[in-house]
Image (cartoon, rainbow, N blue to C red):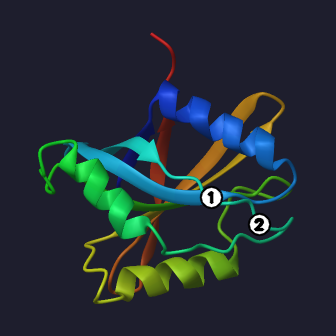
Amino acid sequence: MLQISVPVDVQHGLRLALQRAGSRECGGVLLGEHVGHNHFAVRQVTLQKPGAVASFMRSLVGVANAVRSFVSARGNDYTRFNYLGEWHSHPLFSVQPSTTDHSTMRDLAMEKAVGANFVVLLIFRLSGRTLEGSAHTYLPDGSVYPSILTLEEET
């Protein structure tokens, strides 16, 4: 089981994106750092334009450039810094993945051209001022596993 940590600064950006999107779904790409055995920290998220109330259309335009730029700024250490997966919001629904979410992420994980060992899906929503979320990991064999989502606190 993977553990995915989200630092306070990344949470701040997510809260702003969710507030701006309101009842519309929004999302983007997760860029992260391998910080320990089965433990990854989200270091950056991209934000795509908000979608509809109950859907978010992911776009691959710019994803490769975002990954290259992120890794390049960190010394091209692809084993430590790399693409983790996707995130989006469920502002009016449970933070658990929908059937469509599972299907989309399984397809992404199984896509040979992506070449990922796994992909992570984080789903968020705001409950008042509180950020709620879930984490799931998808493997190239089509399996999916709940993951541990840690929302780091101010120190």
Q: Whole-Å distance between the Cαs marked 2 and 1?
A: 9 Å
The quarter in which the C terminus is drawn is top left
For the image, the number of numbered tags is: 2
Task: For the residues labelled 2 and 1, say whether their Cβ atoms are less than 8 Å apart.
Answer: yes
- Horizontal and vertical percent position of residue 33: 27, 45
Taking 134 as reference, is 92 left or right?
right
Q: Do we see residue 39 in this rendering?
A: no
Quadrant of the rendered image containing residue 128: top right
Taking 3 as reference, is 45 left or right?
right
The disc placed on residue 43 is: none
Per the image, label 2 sits on a secondary structure element best described as loop
The residue shown at (62%, 58%) is 27
Query: Looking at numbered disc 1 in the image, what kind of residue is underneath it?
Result: Gly
Quadrant of the rendered image containing residue 147: bottom left
In this orientation, which residue lies closer to the viewer: 70 or 141? 70
- Horizontal and vertical percent position of residue 32: 33, 48
Q: Height in image: 32 above or below 78? A: above
The disc placed on residue 27 is: 1
Residue assigned mark 2: 51
Task: Bin the neighbour count of mark 1 within 10 Å (Cα to Cα): few under 14, some 14-19, many 20 and up.
Answer: many
Q: Height in image: 102 above or below 126? A: below
